[in-house]
Amino acid sequence: MPDCFIERDIIVRDVRLRVKHWRPEASHKMIALHGWLDSAASFDVLAPLLPHCSVAAVDLAGQGYSAP
């Protein structure tokens, strides 16, 4: 069974960014940033393999579900 995540939008300097967040209650925090022409979905396989980490993957501006 795949690990569940929540998605939310954050606003940074008037730009809406989408964040996928796995296990927000975990004590070890990690921010995952994707490469050029990619999206937060790049971490759909990796995040479930880190059971003790809270992983927040950000769709950078213009990528995935973030605003351009």
Image (cartoon, helix red, strand yellow):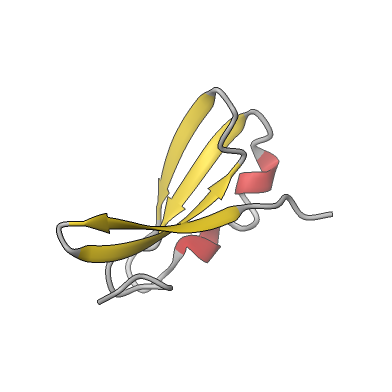
Q: Nearer the viewer, residue 11 or 43?
A: 11
Point out the image quarter for the N terminus: bottom right
Q: Residue furthest top?
A: 27
Q: Nearer the viewer, residue 41 or 16?
A: 16
Name above or below for residue 55 compared with residue 35: above
Q: Residue at x 54, y 64 (%)?
A: 41
Q: How many dots with numbers?
A: 0
Name above or below for residue 58 compared with residue 67: above
Point out the image quarter for the C terminus: bottom left
**Quadrant of the rendered image containing residue 12:** bottom left
- Asked whether residue 60 is in view, the answer is no
Apparent side of residue 35 relative to residue 68 in the rendered image (left or right): right
Apparent side of residue 24 relative to residue 10 in the rendered image (left or right): right
Name above or below for residue 16 compared with residue 67: above
- Residue 66 placed where, x, y %? 35, 70
Apparent side of residue 48 relative to residue 31 in the rendered image (left or right): right
Name above or below for residue 58 compared with residue 36: above
- Residue 36 placed where, x, y %? 32, 68
**Quadrant of the rendered image containing residue 45:** bottom right
Q: Residue at x 64, y 28 (%)?
A: 52
- Residue 18 placed where, x, y %? 40, 62
Q: Residue furthest right?
A: 1
- Asked whether residue 11 is in view, the answer is yes
Q: Residue at x 39, y 63 (%)?
A: 59
Q: Nearer the viewer, residue 18 or 28?
A: 18
Q: Nearer the viewer, residue 14 or 62?
A: 14
Q: Residue at x 27, y 57 (%)?
A: 11
- Residue 27 placed where, x, y %? 55, 22
